[in-house]
Amino acid sequence: QHKESQRWLSAQQATEEVIDKAVDILTVADREADIFDFVAQPRRAGSHLLIRATHNRRVHQETLYLLPSIRQSPIAAKITLELARNPQRPARLATLSVRFKTLEIAPPRHHRQRSQYQPMRVQVILAEEEEPPVGEPAVSWLLLSTLPVERVEQAMQCVRWYSLRWLIERYHYVLKSGCRLEQVQLQSKERIERALATYSVVAWRLLWLTYQAREHPEQSCQTVLQEDEWRALACRMLKTHKPPAKAPSLD
């Protein structure tokens, strides 16, 4: 837990150092970032967190714990989102009921520095699927945020932002596995930065092409590629020097 905490803290600090202070930062993270030290650490103005909770933490409410406390709040709205495909489920639409509430979470009882922390106020958002498809587990996101969430529109925006987390993970996967960025044999900081800048554009392009092909497989590839691009790619894939007369489909 201590190593995980340090990794998240150092990454957040590095992010704030390299991004211009005029730019707001939102760190979106999955359940492994639900670490009290990470949420409690000081951040610069305009730097916020949106984290999926994994711990049913103690709160300063009559119900004592996070999940039953937020479930006491009425459903504020419903939102329908397109969930990206992941190893546990196919891509599909999900209608989520959204609750939100401001709560104070207590430091963990067994924290080694518990006496140094005070209860911390966070915005809690619960987005749950009440009627999942047959055979599919219901989507349930318990989110903690340092953003102001006073209106239903703000809560729904947080849910939308969190729904993009998987797509961001796929981008990093393409950057590391598709572009093999971690295997480049560059030594100087300047060359590594230039390689990262170039590969970032390539990774975005590859991911965009992948999703375009999934959503519009029958469209002509000319919707996303110039003629010289698709002709060169066709020759490469078909192992020929003569490209087809008609542009292939995106698929």
Image (tube, rainbow, N blue to C red):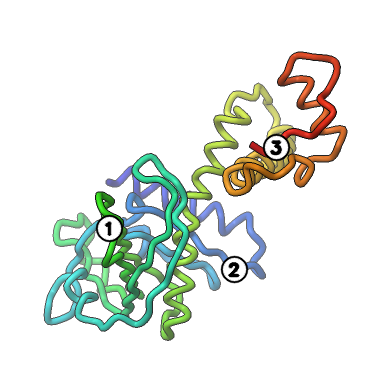
Q: Looking at the image, which is closer to me, 190 or 87? A: 87
Q: What residue does disc 1 label?
A: 138
Q: Looking at the image, which is closer to me, 106 or 225? A: 225
Q: Secondary structure at mark 1?
A: loop
* Residue displayed at 58% across by 29% down: 182
Q: Is residue 94 left or right of residue 239?
A: left
Q: Is residue 36 visible?
A: no
Q: Is residue 188 visible?
A: yes
Decide which of tag 2 and tag 3 comes sooner along the chain. Answer: 2
The amino acid type, in three-letter code, at marker 1 is Ala
Dot in front, 2 or 1: 1
62 shown above or below 165: below
Decide which of tag 1 and tag 3 comes sooner along the chain. Answer: 1
* Residue displayed at 56% across by 64% down: 25
The amino acid type, in three-letter code, at marker 2 is Asp
Decide which of tag 2 and tag 1 comes sooner along the chain. Answer: 2
The tag on residue 249 is: 3
| Label 2 – label 1 distance at C-alpha | 33 Å
Q: Secondary structure at mark 3?
A: loop
Q: What residue does disc 2 label?
A: 24
